[in-house]
Amino acid sequence: MTRRVVFVSPATSPSLRQARFDDGAPLDASGAAPARAAAGALPPAGHVVVSPGVRCRETAAALALDATAAPELAGLDVGRWRGRTLDEVGAAEPAAVAQWLADPAAAPHGGESVRDLCVRVGRWLAAVAETDGRTLAVVEPEVVRAAVVHAVGLPPESFWRLDVPPLTATELSGRAGRWNLRLGRPLGTPETATGG
């Protein structure tokens, strides 16, 4: 049986627009409105989960999804960089940022490495592959990247080369341990609404 996992990236927030590492800030009106407008645009799913981040939980609520918390799908732990902008960190610690962006095993911020995130999300993906039906997950963009890297066997170095725009759906479908990728589409497009 084919398994399907649809990853939905959250709506924009002030932190995202400022290129700020997640600081737990809520969505604002300009982020919540398009999410509310896209409610009902996703195909039905037997399992609906959400990352514990505020932005993901509020996006799921705006999409009118009754989602279960999935702590294993939390965003990348950036340790002491949390709440700071990339420009601030780059100015204060340029070598650390360069190392972090170049080496997936690096965690100069004291949090989690990109490689560790890919492994964590890969474990979740392996477990969900054993469930029947479609799973819908509202998660941070880095979790979508990690899922794609793991599912299609990309090297972890490709992680930062994958763009995941807000309010898009990225679908993995597969069977027998092999996944196919349908790249992200804005919510509400005919293909997303029908699950095509």
Image (cartoon, grey):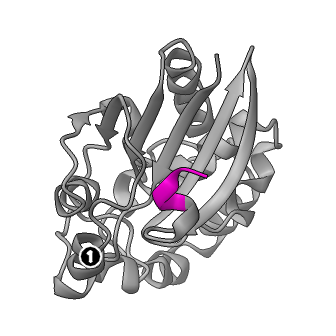
Q: Where is residue 140 in the image (x, y as percent from the top left)?
A: 42, 55
Residue 24 figure quarter: bottom left
Residue at left offset 53%, top offset 37%: 5
Q: Nearer the viewer, residue 36 or 141?
A: 36
For the stretch drawn in magenta, what is the main secondary structure? Answer: helix
Residue 108 point in image, percent of width and height: 55, 52
For the point 55% across and 21% down, the residue is 123
Q: Which amino acid does label 1 sit on?
A: Ala
Q: Is mark 1 on a helix, strand or loop?
A: helix
Let me know if residue 195 is in the magenta part.
yes
Magenta span contains residue 166 = no
Q: Is the residue 93 above or below the residue 114 in the image?
A: below
Looking at the image, is 2 positioned above or below residue 196? above
What residue sits right under mark 1 in the picture? Answer: 37
**Which residue is drawn at the image coordinates 22% and 48% (left, top)?**
65
Of 85 and 53, the residue lying toward us: 53
Name the image quarter holding the N terminus. top right
In the rendered view, tell whether residue 5 sits above or below residue 195: above
- Specify the segment rendered in magenta: 192-196
Comparing 195 with 10, the one in front is 195
Residue 174, quarter of the rendered image: top right
State whether residue 108 appears in this view. no
